[in-house]
Amino acid sequence: QVQLVESGGGLVQAGESLRLSCAASGSVFSRTTMAWYRQAPGKQRGSVASITSTGSTVYAGTVKGRFTISRDNAKNMVYLQMNDLKPEDTAVYYCFALTEGAYPRSYWGRGTQVTVSS
């Protein structure tokens, strides 16, 4: 089992920065691909960024160059540094975990609200 708890959301103005954190429980964190998803009102949940256990990252085109995903395996933490935030980044941000290996399992956090005012 993996439990995920997000923090760091809030209300900021356009152009400002936020850092989201996701604390993961469980002993398999180092063998887990972690990701951030977001869901805006009336829209489908979509991937923002992901990072594998070996540190390979993938970003959505809309955030590339502005957001950075990172992880600290010693602390069971994953982060999303968000710079130059735009009103269209407003959404609930969810932490996601996918265990690697032959029988992958997925887990979601409850989300944290990010609101960017213009």
Image (spheres, rainbow, N blue to C red):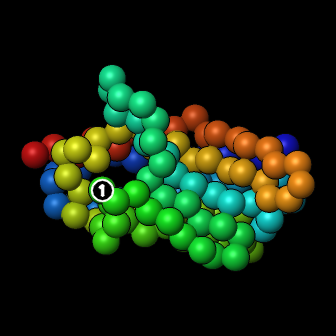
Pick the front one: 54 or 110? 54
Query: Which residue is at a point 80% across and 44% down the rendered structure image?
Result: 105
Query: Which residue is at a point 55% across and 60% down the rendered structure image?
Result: 50
Query: Which residue is at a point 78% across and 54% down the rendered structure image?
Result: 99
Please determine whether, in this image, residue 51 is positioned above or below residue 22: below
Instruction: Count how many numbered circles sit on residues in the image.
Output: 1
Q: Is residue 31 left or right of residue 110?
A: right
Q: Is residue 50 left or right of residue 10?
A: right
**What amino acid is at disc 1?**
Thr
Please determine whether, in this image, residue 29 is positioned above or below residue 106: below
Q: Is residue 106 left or right of residue 20?
A: right
Please determine whether, in this image, residue 26 is positioned above or below residue 108: below
Q: Point out residue 107 in the picture as x, y percentages from the top left corner.
A: 71, 41
Query: Would residue 43 be visible to someone looking at this image?
Result: yes
Q: Point out residue 14 in the picture as x, y percentages from the top left corner.
A: 15, 54
Please determine whether, in this image, residue 52 is positioned above or below residue 6: below
Look at mark 1 in the image and give the residue it sits on: 62
